[in-house]
Amino acid sequence: MSRDRFLLIMRCLHFARNPGEDDRQPEDRLFKIKPLIVYFNNKMEEIYYTDKNLSLDLWRGRLSFRQYIKNKRHKYGIKLYVLTEPDGTILKFAVYTGQLHDFGGKGHAANVVLHLMEGLLDVGQAVYMDSYYNSYDLATKLLRRQTYYTYLLLFQLR
């Protein structure tokens, strides 16, 4: 496929109606692709039987709506939270675009985990995560929901 053809397809590909001059601008920055994200997450939950072991990680990419990620070496980028199987199969993902999102605010990391694990709790899953998600409250919530939680523990060597 030629470059021009690809750009034409990308320009014409829409998943939501563009707001008119009289319409209010949507608050969700992802309103154009939100139906696609919801469809993907729902379909994967519907058709794919998950393994007992899952992994949750933060992916950082470059887009126009960058986010500040305090503990990362490269501090600016998009936050894409991905729940995967050990072989890399993506089961569910969520894009964080700012404070207005469903899981923003205090306890952000725990809210992300609970959001992505929705539908997979109470069945004895084991989820492996980065230290970014580490909190006692999250571990307690997951254990109450019969979900096992393993995270990366880093020791400061002096």
Image (cartoon, rainbow, N blue to C red):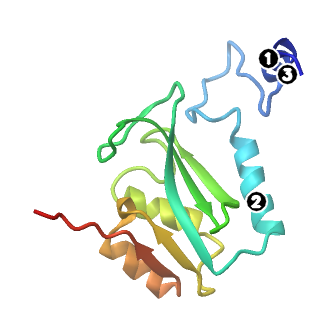
**Which residue is located at x 80 percent, y 59 percent?**
43
Q: Residue at x 43, y 79 (%)?
A: 141
Label located before the other in sequence (3 or 2): 3
Q: Amino acid at mark 2?
A: Asn
Where residue 65 appears, as percent x and y from the top left, is 50, 29
Counting residues from the start of the chain, the first of labels 1 and 2 encountered is: 1
**44 displayed left or right of 5:** left
- Secondary structure at badge 1 equals helix
With respect to residue 57, does 24 lie above or below? Answer: above
Write down the residue under mark 2: 42
Q: Which mark is residue 9?
A: 3
- What amino acid is labelled 1 in the image? Leu
Distance CA(mark 1)–CA(mark 3): 5 Å
Q: Nearer the viewer, mark 3 or mark 2?
A: 3
**Which residue is disc 1 drawn over?**
7
Q: Residues within 10 Å of mark 2 (few under 14, many from 20)?
A: few
Q: Would you identify the image quadrant in which residue 118 lies? A: bottom right
Task: Indicate the position of residue 8 as horizontal and vertical percent values.
Answer: 84, 15
* Quadrant of the rendering where the C terminus is positioned: bottom left
Q: Are marks 1 and 3 in contact (CB under 8 Å)?
A: yes
Residue density around tag 1, few if under 14, some if 14–19, many if 20 or more, within 10 Å: few
Q: Amino acid at mark 3?
A: Ile
